[in-house]
Each structure stands twice: as structure tokens, then as C-alpha cells.
Image (cartoon, helix red, strand yellow):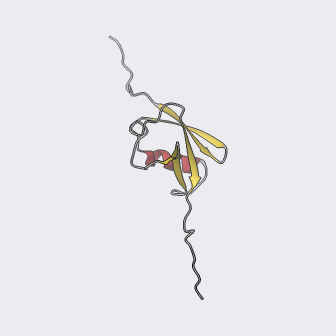
Amino acid sequence: MSQEPEDVKPKLNLVINFEGQHITVKVKPNMPFRKIFEAAEKRFGKDSGTFKFVFEGQRLNAEHTPGGSGLEDGDMIDAVLEQLGGGVLCLHQ
């Protein structure tokens, strides 16, 4: 009898970069980015929602998955601080 591994889906090693610091997370291709983002923020010591995550110039949606977004093993995701506010102030005299 041959024994098959319980988890036959391949896992991806994704690298998350924040200001030159890198962490590697091992994920399933169908795992929602939301879970990956939460884990990364925790590992960088940041509050949930602190970062926006970008891959090849495109912001990643928390409900999408690495497999559905075309990410491959070893790809790097950039974590950048989410900017709040910054609106234009107009003063008229």
C-alpha cells in the first residue's frame, strides 16, 4: 500500500518586504490574502490594517488568493504603510 501525503497541494514561499526587512511565509495557493496580511502585520509588530500590500505595482485584494493572482513560489510582496488623510486644504480669501 502506498501512502499519499495528506496535503497534496503545493505550498508557496512568499517573501514580504517592509522597509528592507524580509519575512518568508509558507502558504497554500488558495489561502485568502487576508490571513497572510494579518500574519505579516503581526510578525512586523504592526496593528491590523497598518499596511497595504503590493505585488508588481498592483495592490492586492484581501479576499483574493495567491493562486488566483498568479503569484509563484519565491515572489516578493511589498508592504507599505497605509496613508490616511492627506486631502487638499484650500483657503480662499
Q: Position of residue 77 (x, y in %)?
A: 54, 42
Instruction: Point out the residue furthest to the right here.
Output: 20
Q: Position of residue 5 (x, y in %)?
A: 39, 22
Instruction: Point out the residue furthest to the left here.
Output: 1
Q: Nearer the viewer, residue 61 or 86?
A: 86
Where, by quadrant of the figure, is residue 16 drawn? top right
Q: What residue sits 52% from the left and 42% below the top?
A: 56
Looking at the image, residue 9 sits to the left or right of residue 17; the answer is: left
Q: Position of residue 42 (x, y in %)?
A: 56, 50
Instruction: Point out the residue furthest to the top here.
Output: 1
Q: What residue sits 48% from the left and 44% below the top?
A: 36
Q: What residue sits 58% from the left and 52% below the top?
A: 80
Q: Position of residue 58 (x, y in %)?
A: 49, 47
Instruction: Point out the residue furthest to the bottom here.
Output: 93
- Is residue 83 visible in the rendered image? The answer is yes
Q: What residue sits 43% from the left and 27% below the top?
A: 10
Looking at the image, residue 28 sits to the left or right of residue 39; the answer is: left
Looking at the image, residue 58 sits to the left or right of residue 2; the answer is: right
Q: Nearer the viewer, residue 31 or 86?
A: 86
Q: Quadrant of the N terminus?
A: top left
Q: Quadrant of the C terminus?
A: bottom right
Total count of labels: 0
Q: Nearer the viewer, residue 41 or 15?
A: 15
Q: Nearer the viewer, residue 87 or 72?
A: 87
Relative to 40, does residue 83 appear above or below in the rendering?
A: below
Looking at the image, residue 45 sits to the left or right of residue 73; the answer is: right
- Is residue 42 visible in the rendered image? The answer is no
Relative to 48, does residue 89 appear above or below in the rendering?
A: below
